[in-house]
Amino acid sequence: MKTPLNRYLGASLLLLCSSQTSFALPPESHGESVRSIPDAQQISAWTTIDNQRVVINVNATDTYLLTLKQQCHGLGWAQNITVTMSNNTIWAGFDEIKADGLQCPIDRISRVSANDLLNLQTP
């Protein structure tokens, strides 16, 4: 006796829908997306927005939002925070923030304005 293909497809879809996998949605983007931050050795200030976003000021004139690939728990109260860079440049998808030994890869970099900063909201 042959079983219709539809029955197998329906059972497969039911299994997929009933799995308890949860997907984290990345924080929304703000500002102008850029690939890198040149002259990053001159970071003058930084602010943690949440466990996945950090704002840094470079040269006292340029402000950037770093969005990490995943949550970096403890970022808000870390004693030691560093940012890796190559030739004084921070690259999205290559460099990372290190917070008390945790390695937190940088997913996206956006140049942000003062107005963009007002629109940043903690989830």
Image (tube, rainbow, N blue to C red):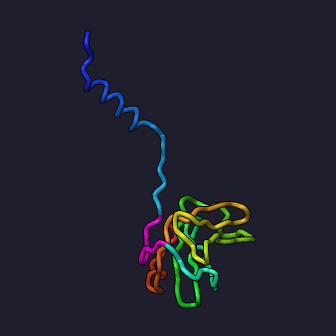
Instruction: Pick out the residue farthest to the right.
Output: 79
- The magenta stretch spans which residues? 27-35
Q: Quadrant of the N terminus?
A: top left
Residue displayed at 57% across by 76% down = 89
Residue 115 drawn above or below residue 106? below
Residue 97 drawn above or below residue 55? above
| Residue 85 position by quadrant | bottom right
- Seen in the image, is 14 located left or right of residue 36? left
Residue displayed at 48% across by 47% down = 22
The spot of residue 57 in percent (x, y) is 58, 83
The spot of residue 98 in percent (x, y) is 67, 66
In the image, 43 versus 49, the foreground residue is: 43
| Residue 101 position by quadrant | bottom right
How many numbered marks, from 0 up? 0
Residue 91 drawn above or below residue 17? below
Does the magenta run of residues contain 123?
no
The spot of residue 118 in percent (x, y) is 47, 82
In the image, 44 versus 42, the foreground residue is: 42
- Magenta span: predominant SS is loop
